[in-house]
Image (cartoon, rainbow, N blue to C red):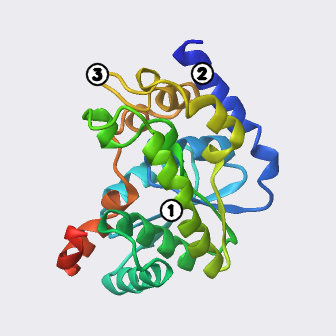
Amino acid sequence: MDVTSRAELLLKMLGDQHESISGKTALLLSGGIDSSLLLSIYMDKIIPYTIGFPASQDISFSEKLCNEFSLNLNVIETGEEMVRKAFMKVIETDKNITFTDIGFETVFQIACDEVRQDKIMTGQGADEIFYGYMKFRDGRENSNRNSLEKLFTTTLPREMKIASSSGKTLIAPYLDRNILDSFSTLPYEMHVSDDSNKIIIREAARIAGLPEFIVHRPKKAAQYGSGISSFLRKELQGWSSR
């Protein structure tokens, strides 16, 4: 099966979940490839939100994308106190969390605190399944086994706890069992090449009609694209060694 056929299969498997998304669900949109593909598939079922400091990259890319689709975007502009408050809640949830993880979980905590809907959809799992992390691109790791193990033993339980404590439910379409079975065990070379990563997802995005600035956008994790990690790094100098 070639890349195009696999991308079409991914689109079908994501589309098969459409009817199970009942009511209005908030989508945590970063303007990156993963959440943007979800927006294109579920736009009639979701309400997009983006989070970040004013003028952050995630807000800029998300606004540009939603303009392409003529969709209203809910922008949650963070301030220092909002970030500090969310950070403390994350620490209460997981006292052993590392500095590497605290940024994106702070973004997720803000979403759980601020969105009006009871369900929050994210692109969780796409980086692990489709080899999105820099460690795959630069050759440090050529298997996603450790990343998947961390996702299911640490990250996902923590995010479910964060969501539950705020009265929210986490929706993660990429973690559908059919997608996991079909894509997570494919060899490294099916996901990463010399000049690209997430090859299958990028092809799916192209087929779905997403604009080129999304299809080719390099990975920018939410904690960086939102500007939140930069703020936390200044606030929490001691955490950077954890």
Q: Amino acid at mark 3?
A: Asp
Q: Callout 3: helix, strand or loop?
A: loop
Quarter holding the C terminus is bottom left
Q: Residue 183's mark? A: none
Residue 73 in view of the camera: no
Q: Could you give the CA–CA distance between mark 1 and mark 3, rounded to whole angstroms?
A: 31 Å
Q: Residues within 10 Å of mark 2 (few under 14, many from 20)?
A: some
* Viewer-closest of 164 and 17: 164
Q: x, y percentage for residue 7?
A: 58, 24
Up-down: is 93 above or below 227?
Answer: below
Q: Could you give the CA–CA distance between mark 3 and mark 2, rounded to whole angstroms?
A: 20 Å
Q: Residues within 10 Å of mark 3 (few under 14, many from 20)?
A: few
Q: x, y percentage for residue 105?
A: 44, 68
Q: Callout 2: helix, strand or loop?
A: helix
Q: Residue at x 76, y 44 (%)?
A: 18
User: Among all residues in the image, which is located at the extreme top?
Assistant: 1
If you read the primary sequence from the N terminus, does the residue marked by circle 2 or circle 1 appear first? 2
Q: x, y percentage for residue 17?
A: 75, 43
Residue bearing the label numbered 3: 194
Q: Amino acid at mark 2?
A: Arg
Q: Callout 1: helix, strand or loop?
A: helix
Q: Nearer the viewer, mark 1 or mark 3?
A: 1
Up-down: is 242 above or below 152?
Answer: below
Q: Residue 154's mark? A: 1
- Left or right: residue 147 compared with residue 42: left
If you read the primary sequence from the N terminus, does the residue marked by circle 3 or circle 2 appear first? 2
Q: Residue 6's mark? A: 2
Report the number of numbered marks: 3
* Viewer-closest of 178 and 5: 178
